[in-house]
Amino acid sequence: MKSYKPLFILSLVCLWCVSAAWAQSSLIRGRITDKRTKETLPGVNVSVPGTYKGAVTNIDGVYEIRDLAPGDYDLKASLIGYTVQVRTGVHVEQGKTTQIDFSLEATVLALGQSVEVIGKKPLFETDITASQQHISSEEIEQKVVESVTDLVGEQLGVVVQDNKIHIRGGRADESLYIIDGQSIKDPLSGYSNTLYVNAAAVKELKVITGGFDAEYGQAMSGVVDIETKEGADHYSGGVSVKSDNLAKGLFPSFNTDIVQLTLGGPEPLTRRLLPAIGLRLPGKLNFFLSGYGNISDTYLPQADKLYPAKASYEKFAPRQENDWHLMGKLSWEIRPGRKVSLSHDRSVNINQGYFTSLATDIGGFPYDYSKMLDHYNTLTKEANLTTLQWIHTLNSRTFYRMTLSRFFTSIHSAVQNKHWSDYQEGLDLLPILYIPDSEGNVKTRYGDGFYDTGDAEGWYDYFSDNWTIKTDLTTQPNDKHSIKAGLEARYTDMQVVDINAPWYGESGLGRNHDYFRVYPNDGALYLQDRITYDGMIVNIGLRYDYWFPGKYVDDAIKDSNTVTITDAARVKYKDETFQLWGLRGKSHLSPRLGISHPVTDNDVLYLHYGHFSQQPKGQYVYAKLRSTSEATYQLFGNPNLKPTTTVAYELGLKHRFNANQTLEVKAYYKDMFDYPTAATVRKYSPRYGNISFLMYVNMDYARARGIEMRFRRRYSQFLSGNIDFTYALATGKSSTPNTNLLVAAGKVSEKPLGESRLSWDRPYRLSTDLYFDMPEKANIRLAGVRLPEKWGVTLRWEYESGKRYRRIIDVANNVYEKDEYGSLSDPWMRLDLKWYKEFELFKTHLALLVEAENVFNARVPRIINPVTGRPYQPGDVIPVSWYDDPDDLPATNPARYDWPRRVMTGLEIRF
């Protein structure tokens, strides 16, 4: 018994310690009142997001949340009929009671429609079941960006290559851009960035890279949800001017000028004019206007003059790259809970396609035309989005939204705005070389790989006119469920005229051409339910997408003279489609499930499983369906294409060290099925006999997997930042659906039989953003010297793996490695910087700006020499084909590197 005495005493001590700790457990207590009447509010739900903890106020409006470990928490107070209020950064100490009172404001809006945050913005949201990143207008102002595309390119899981955005290993057409609730996805190319939106017009940007809800469709890799600014109850505006010409003597100039104007506030006509004649509109009517222009000669050679599609546009094309954006919005809150808004976005881009990709062309600098850029194409791209939206709150639990929109986009590409019949054949004549061989015979060779006379080959004109009606309803029948249901329908008028080398042949339509005008329509229905359990949130959804290719396709299927449609294809089309209102349609069902579960008071585990799909690009369906050319190698559209689908899995963990420091780690895996690719189709035609041709079919697949980490910290009221790291792999059968066409034309030796790395695969990226802001009256001293006030610095540093390429293993025989993109070029690093200093003059805000991109002038590769694995340098060994093949990648192409260092200085005025 004596031997057990020390153990018994030790047990009593431990029990006493535990009891003492329990007795000293912390709690949060408070009283909740009505902001206007000051009366106490019983029945208010007070929760600690990300934990199981919570309480409900009693009849005296008092609540208590017990058994909290020391640390920093957020508190959320919600009651039907009142604005939800979130109090952030509540500090709890061991054994102490923290008093937190709320004063809630009554509202007629549905619960959750209006949220008030008191304190600093939470670093992460604990109830989200997807990977999403929010960027506010305040954060955007601190960044060195000009467009929404620039912002998206900085986010976790995003790769920018050849001016295209790839999200989590997906192709560039797999993302969806939404502006104020409306899609701007181009039905022909599948690209979503057809409307140029300047970053200053954005109120909030949400980038969802995984696990998006059922309300989002026609996307497999990511969603970019843009909310534009609107006018407030007071007037505000500003002018910003930036240029790289102001510091021309210190840094290289690319003749770049950027101007931006904004103005918003109460609409003056109805506020002043109508009351003057005895008329008054109920409620509040506000407006917001934004204008933006960005013109530059770029770092590449320029044409003497550009020739836009309309003569009236010539004044908007003074430089090599010309980007314009205009936005206007009217918001009328007729009374609380009823709001109507009308907005219009318009962008015009005029250039020569150096940094633009088309549906049928990857774009890029036309090095073989660099001696005669005035005879190369001018590209005019226009986009218009008009949106009319009505939001109506029915009661404290339900509201709905109805939207009617028109999205119009067009592209015209021509040499000097000529008709294709006026083109002259491009010729490479000079110099003339006479090369003797060992036997004394002389061989004559014309040209040096650069065109000397004539015009470029392409003439292209395209438009799509898209009308969409969309409605959704959100209701919260009880405290457990939040249900959202919606439907949308889109009608499209789309036309393409594509002429190549019009001087060839006798048809007058050149060596290769295509023409079609089609009227497809598509839409969707969806239902999702957000279920809140004690300690768990489940987000479950189901989406049904439908698509009618249109009468153009139906008639081609019925017509036995359509050469590219086999009898088997006609049967398949009928079997795999349904008929409605005289048209044949296709559909797809996509289930989605997300779960968020707090593991501890400071850890949240979430997972998501979902099916995502999108209809085939118009180019893959309609191309050459009813037009054939004289070209030897052609690729035909296929009406039988099925939707491309992705099955994605994601697991993530969020950890909060304290209110100012968080870490998020997530892993994902994606299977992508039914990718279109070119395949040989053979048939017998009574007119042509046995024929074979290349057609798009659903035969390719791809996979993407990766790990992403983000560490965020607010060091103080002056300094904050984040560190992002991504490791990812993207593999598949091919990087382009045109591989077999390139094989047939002799451009590629063979298509890989198995999976290989995709061209945009970048295994790793490490980046950090630092924001330093010295506010007014900070009174900070360094070595006894008081630092100036109202200035700040932003830094963004990136380190990323290099570009994929196919290495040459035998230079003499021009033998490449087996995998198409089996090698990586050297990694690259760059730093961007922004400095600003603010002043006040006559109640007007002034700011001096300095923005520097690629501060250390890093040479980021765009074209890789497959012998050395880096961009060509003088003296490097080069492939045999680069010596005399104008169709290959010439060694001295100035576009082999990305932008060098750019320094912009400017002035901003705001009121």
Image (tube, helix red, strand yellow):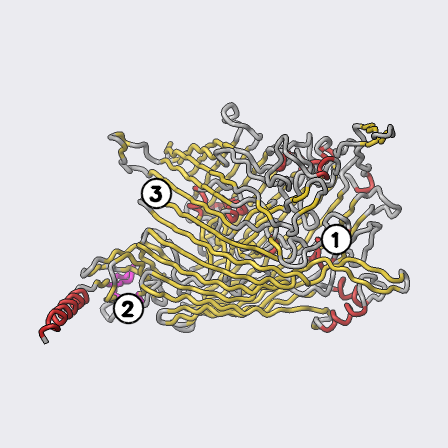
Location of residue 42 with respect to 776 vertically, above or below: below
Residue 276 seen in the figure:
no
The mark nearer the N terminus, 1 or 2, is 2
Q: Image check: 800 left or right of 354?
A: left
Mark in front: 1 vs 2: 1
Q: Image check: 595 left or right of 180?
A: left
Taking the spot 39% from the left edge, 59% from the top edge, the residue there is 654
Q: CA distance from mark 2 to mark 3?
A: 35 Å
Amino acid tagged 1: Leu
Q: Quadrant of the N terminus?
A: bottom left
Front position in the image: 25 or 482: 25
Amino acid tagged 2: Ala
Residue 192 seen in the figure:
yes
Disc 3 on helix, strand or loop? Answer: strand
Q: Which residue is mark 3?
A: 719
Residue range corresponding to the magenta coloring: 31-46
Amino acid tagged 3: Leu
Q: Which residue is mark 2?
A: 55
Front position in the image: 840 or 449: 449
Q: Crowdedness of circle 2 by 10 Å Cα count: few (<14), some, many (20+)?
A: some
Assign the magenta stretch its main secondary structure.
loop
